[in-house]
Image (cartoon, rainbow, N blue to C red):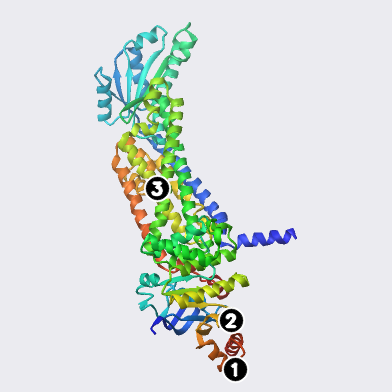
Amino acid sequence: MLKSLIVKEVKDLLRDRKILFAMIIMPLIIYIGMGAAMSSLMEQSIKQVEETVKAGVKIALLNEDNGPWSKTFIEYAEKYWNATIIQINTTNLNKALNTTESLGLRALYIIPPGFSANISNEKPGVIQVYFILHDLSITSMGLLSVYNNIVSGFSKYLSSIIITRTAKVNPAFAMAPITGKTQVLLSGTIVSANLVQALSGQLFVLPVAPMLVIGYATSIAAMSIGVEKEEKTLEVLLSLPIRRRDIVLSKLTGSLLISLLASISMLIGFSYYMRSMTSIGANSTSEATQISMTGGIFGLIGVPGLILYVLSVFFAVFLASTLGLYLGSFGENVRSAQSMVGYIWIIVFFPLYMAIFTDFALDPLAKILAISVIPFAAPLVVLKAFLSGKIIYGVISIASSIGLLALIVYLLTKRFEGEKLLVGKSKRKKKSAFFKFGF
Amino acid sequence: MSNVVEVEDLVKIYPGNIKAVDGLSFTVREGEIYGLIGPNGAGKTTTLRIIATLLKPTSGRVEVAGYDIVENPDEVRRNISYLPEEAGAYRNLTGVEYLRFMAELYAKSKEEAERMVKEAIEISGLGDKIYDKTSVYSKGMKRRLLLARTLMVKPKLAILDEPTSGLDVVHALHVRNIILKYAKEYKVTILLSSHNMLEVEYLCDRVGIIYKGRLYTEGKPNELIEEYKASNLEEVFAKVVGVHA
């Protein structure tokens, strides 16, 4: 008896083409595709960093020491890192940073006065590194590591010299004769490298919240049309003295309100999460207060950026709801309507992560534009556009979302105007079609 | 007496070249109760759905209250009220909320909508259950609610697909009386389909027997009984369908 029941159950599920496609075919396509895409994106980022290193890094140097050990540092950087050192003559940090940026360089090294004297006296010498960051991408973070590695590499290099030359030396000093102090200029704010690492980590978590909200919104929208079919209310609804456009509008307004509530709820919750995480990443209390109180990454993009970000999330959620309603209309009941949108998170996930891997400062224009016009990437594109100061991409991204939204609303209205919404499109055998149409 | 429904040479072919309606022609006069009867798959529901503007004809012409269903579907919908064979109500709404929602779509004022709701509550005979969510309704209760919804707006044409489907004898009788009342007292034209020949004989002024999408015979029930030398409409139906099967 149990065997018969199981056979019936399996047959019923496997013969449903939508379930077969959604549950068995899609995962194969998705995870293979996702794995390939992610590794390719990661490889591209690593390659970009490697090529930069191979071509030789360019460093702005403010040498306030001019002693023998600072000269050793220059020789080391030139010899082992193929570095081009451009010396800057100013004592003002802001001026030095402005000069570095205007020269198109990404890092400013400051060797303070007394650097050589300290090392000669067996005291650690300090090299300050200011890294100019325009994006929190893998490539940018990789380059940040490269510039840090120059200092740590020099420390090891110097260590071997000291140990070779001096018979009796303080072991602690010999092991680490150089201390690197790295700070990052991000969106006009100087923050610690640790905080930047924390913010970069947040960036990877950032798509999770929109993905969840978008997933739920899509599912709810698909269910709303699936329920109409399953509960047999659609036929009456379509015969009422209401224009098809109004039915679509009312369904979309419902989705819109849910999208709005979902976006607000997500932003409140996520801002709290971001603040908490940034407090952990921040070095000092003042830094934590400075950045975390304004919501981590959100604190760096300012009010206009935040407004555009909220809009981008709202349009992404609204777009997903509309898409859910459209795709759900192809289902015959709640189960099949939801299976139609079960994997919609993939078309949200991919663009968002592609945006993370894209460096808005280093990548070619065509790549940045391509990412910007993918609608579901909008929340990340807006964020990165503001971080890199290239706001236009954020605007393009939102415009693209609105464009696709208009297209889906048009298709949805057409679908409600036609009869396929009610009877579907069947090219099955005569017997099953008769059964389906019920005449 | 003018025609509320005019169907002329109607053809409906579904994808897959499935011909559901094949050159069907008939008219329904104002205030008349017209019954479409036929076996399963004869094309009754498809015809009613076309008249209700839910499906588009492949060819032929259908007019309701003088409006072409293809050219003026919005006008047609203002003149009809349709009860599908398998219809449901929004499960999270109470019966009265459902009726109010529907009434507001037809009524010109709030007062008129409330009058409709009050009347529908009476038609449905659901009593206090009308304030319960429809998710707890039995099939029969839902059917009564939906019929009340269909008739409360006093449309020019009520299209009822198997109106007493799922109802027990007592409630089916109640529904039939309501249908008769609305047709006679409020001059609502009714086009219905049914498998229940006794019901059709009791309710309909005229009936059309369709089979394989075509109209095989049409007339007043008693005239058909006489013409086919039968004792009731069921025998007429069996003879017509038997001859053409």
| Circle 2 chain | B
Number of the label disc, if any, that sits on residue B229 = 1
How far apart, in angstroms, are the residues tagged by discs 2 and 3?
56 Å
**On the same chain: label 3 and label 1?**
no
* Image coords of residue A414 (percent x, y): 38, 64
User: Callout 3 environment at 10 Å: few (<14), some (14 to 19), or many (20+)?
Assistant: many
Q: Residue at x 36, y 79 (%)?
A: B66
Q: Could you say which quadrant of the image residue A152 lies in?
A: top left
How far apart, in angstroms, are the residues tagged by discs 1 and 2?
16 Å
| Circle 3 chain | A
- Amino acid type of the residue that numbered disc 3 sits on in the rendered structure: Ala
What is the tally of numbered marks visible in this picture?
A: 3
* Image coords of residue A224 (percent x, y): 48, 56
Q: Residue at x 44, y 38 (%)?
A: A206
* Image coords of residue A72 (percent x, y): 36, 17
User: Callout 1 environment at 10 Å: few (<14), some (14 to 19), or many (20+)?
Assistant: few
Label 2–label 3 contact, CB within 8 A = no
Does residue A313 sit above or below B226 in this rendering? above
Q: Identify the secondary structure beneath mark 3.
A: helix
Q: Which residue is mark 2?
A: B197
How far apart, in angstroms, are the residues tagged by discs 3 and 1?
70 Å
Mark 1 / mark 2, whichever is N-terminal: 2
Residue furthest right as drawn: A1
Q: Closer to the observer: label 2 or label 3?
A: 2
Q: Which residue is mark 3?
A: A316
| Circle 1 chain | B
**Would you say residue B162 is visible in this rendering?**
no
Q: Could you say which quadrant of the image residue B144 lies in?
A: bottom right
Q: Identify the secondary structure beneath mark 1.
A: loop
**On the same chain: label 2 and label 3?**
no
